[in-house]
Image (cartoon, rainbow, N blue to C red):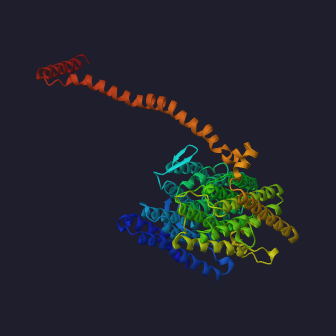
Amino acid sequence: MYQYVGLIVLFPLIGLLVNGLLGRKIKNETIVGIIGSGAVGLSFLVAAAIFVEMLGMPEDGRSHVVTLFTWIAAGSFKVSAAYQIDQLSVLMTLVVTGVGFLIHVYSIGYMHGDRGFWRFFTYLNLFIFAMLNLVLADNYLLMFLGWEGVGLCSYLLIGFWYDKKFPGVGITWTGDAANKAFWVNRIGDFAFMIGMFLIFREFGTLTFREVMGGAEHLAIGNNTMFWITLLLFIGATGKSAQIPLFIWLPDAMAGPTPVSALIHAATMVTAGVYMIARNSALYALAPTTMMIVAIGGALTAIMAASIGIAQNDIKKVLAYSTVSQLGYMFLALGVGAFTAGIFHVMTHAFFKACLFLGSGSVIHAMHEEQDIRHMGGLKKVMPKTYWTFLISSFAIAGFPPLSGFFSKDEILWKAFSDGSLALWIIGALAALMTAFYMFRMVTLTFEGEPRWAKDKHPHESPLTMTIPLIVLAGLAILGGFVGIPAALGGGNAIEHWLHPVFAQAHHTMSLTEHHSHATEYILMGISVVIALTGFWFGRKIFLADPGADTRIAAKTGFLYRILANKYYVDEMYNGSVVRPLVKTSDSFLYRIFDVRIIDGAVNGLAKTTGWVSSMMRYMQTGVVQNYAALVVLGIVVVLGLLIFS
């Protein structure tokens, strides 16, 4: 089946071409939805067939490269359009296509009646096509093509409702949010490009296998590796919304909710995590960079979690939750727990996609209402949405035996066993905040008495929306069982599955387990207590008093305002970066450099040309006598030169 890997990428390409070129003429939403969803579903089936074939192979024979054609050949530089099939790329492909298929199906119901229905599915298929190139590429250049492709799709889909108002800091329309995402990501993408240049200079190739092979001969602490890995990490901070480039993700909620689920929760924002995991052998040679990654991830996790406590927009709460969970993934990568990071990518895709789609179901039923303070009592009228949302909330909070418990606990355990007690404490506090704000949201949205306006008539969503919710909730329940640790009697199947991919990095770092199961049991118990504490406070406070936020804000004063206003990070960026740039652009670049220098040079050249032309026109008077006089004068001058020379 390996030779058919091209079909995984081809099917979404066909879907986007058919819907993109013919969607306006088809006019039937069902047909457009089937084409878009079916393309991704077929890709999932091919990926699943390859996965099954890999299961029957020996561990050291599962990795292959399938070359389609030579893409670029210039002198000694050669890059092929080739896909690397191994345990990591297949796992990511299954997540992208599997979750992507469910979200496509959900979109059929959610986007029903939208004037851009066919355009929406075209963009979704384009995104899947780009994301698959990113995770399957066998070289940095093809990965970067997919990297930029998903960035383009993010821009198109955030601003999909381009005429919709979106109030925010410096943002009025959804197009502003799309621009913000585009420009913030360009910072990280520029760093990624420089990192690629350094990789080519150091290794003379951009192919993953050849680069990792060359890395085997380098010493730990190599200065070039530090700069390469740091630049790649900066690229990842943009795409995966880490400090200091996380500001675009909450505003990206301006896009349709399926976009938030697919791009900004389950797939695109995990591209940075995947990229670092793919380069694990390089990061193992740069312990300083790994510490930066771990600290950055931990700070992102707790900062975003604290902001989520004070948010009232249901999608904004989930957005900051996403940023926080991405921080957990980077924490795992930074302490060398690459498998735990990818494991959390998988489980997070299940429960966070379910949560976002559940929020979309609520918004759809509440006629675009997103403020959880104006909801309440929805579990009676939306039972399927409520139960799936509740299950996924338990999963993200870390309740056993749901998927989030195993992946999050694995990250915290690896942080502790690595000797990073401070990082473990930060991660534990972020977990407590996560449980609290999730059950605050569940309580205010679904529990208690209804607080919605009289013109609202909420109802359960159609089957096209609820079936994906049920499937994702099921995955949120069962998905963690592939990573049951040895301390609980499991074989940690996902760790064994991914071991060959990260073996070189583990060998370089000489990772060993040096803590007893007793310590691991204690930490698991603490994690469960943390989840229960957050659940109890989140439910008890807001079930008894849905307006408790007002009372809490009055008691905590400035602290609550800081959290509600997101630490004023957007205001700081506006004051220190955006406004100075705008002012400089207007007062100097426009009024002086553009108007006076550039326009002055162009206009001056035009005036000079006009003056010279006006002088020369006297030579072309149209009077024959003048021409004759000039001819005679010329003859006289020539004769004079001949005589006196």
| Farthest left residue in view | 624
Relative to 594, say whether 64 is above or below: below
Residue drawn at (79%, 67%) of the image: 528
Relative to 573, say whether 252 is above or below: below
Q: Nearer the viewer, residue 562 or 270?
A: 562
Q: Quadrant of the N terminus?
A: bottom right
> Total of numbered circles in the picture?
0
Residue 104 in the image: state x and y as whole percent. 51, 68
Residue 206 in the image: state x and y as whole percent. 59, 60
| Farthest bottom residue in view | 56
Relative to 190, say whether 490 is above or below: below
Q: Quadrant of the C terminus?
A: top left
Q: Is residue 202 left or right of residue 39?
A: right
Relative to 221, say whether 11 is above or below: below
Residue 101 in the image: state x and y as whole percent. 53, 71
Residue 617 in the image: state x and y as whole percent. 22, 24
